[in-house]
Image (tube, rainbow, N blue to C red):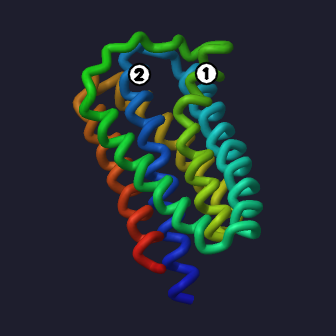
Amino acid sequence: MTGILNEIITLMLMAFALGMDAFSVGLGMGMLRIGLRQIVKIGLTIGLFHIWMPLLGIITGRLLSEQFGTIATYIGGCLLIILGIQMIWAAFRDSDATLIAPVGIGLILFAFSVSLDSLSVGLTLGIYGAKTAFVLACFGIGAAILTWSGLLIGRRVQGMLGSYSEVLGGSILLAFGVKLLVSF
């Protein structure tokens, strides 16, 4: 029972970490005073991308795991560490890049860009042999809720949390990467 509980907590924390990207970008977009209907659409789109991107990663990870075994687990741990460091580093870069408008193709590009890390984490989880349906539900629901939260808070706060949320998300991914490597 403890093993299952640990896996659930781990997956929920990973979902939170992955959704922090969408949350922090949502904070910035929320400052654009996007309407509530558009906020719902953005959250649903990002949630869907956080379902199918890790699904592709899980499928690929399972194939790699069958082919390469323990080496694939080390690769997965290294990927999580790299993603975590990248998220933390991105939070400290001065980037005033223009936002893509979250409508039409811009919304698709936005959802794709904030869910790319889910593909890599899905790859790691596929190697690790995680429960696919639970992973996808956690990632999709978590990303949608965090996106909606970021957009709504961004409308009110005007950007107090931005980079700190990415540092938190990156730290969680980094910690799980180290945990994967140390467990062997």
Residue type at tag 2: Gly
Report x, y in % for residue 51: 68, 46
Is residue 182 shown left or right of residue 164?
right
Residue shown at the point (71%, 61%) measured from the top left: 64
Report x, y in % for residue 140: 62, 47
Sooner in the amino-acid sequence: mark 2 or mark 1: 2
Residue shown at the point (31%, 49%) measured from the top left: 168
Report the Cα–Cα distance between label 2 and label 1: 17 Å
Is residue 138 shown left or right of residue 68?
left
Residue shown at the point (66%, 72%) measured from the top left: 69
The residue under label 1 is 109
Residue shown at the point (73%, 63%) measured from the top left: 62
Q: Residue furthest bottom?
A: 1
- Mark count: 2
Above/below status of 43 relative to 171: above
Q: Can residue 84 be spotted in the picture?
A: yes
Contact (Cβ within 8 Å) of mark 2 with mark 1: no
- Label 1 crowding class (10 Å Cα cut-off): few <14, some 14-19, many 20+? some
The residue under label 2 is 30
Above/below status of 105 relative to 168: above
Give SS at disc 2. Answer: helix
Residue 109 lies in what quarter of the image?
top right
- Label 2 crowding class (10 Å Cα cut-off): few <14, some 14-19, many 20+? many
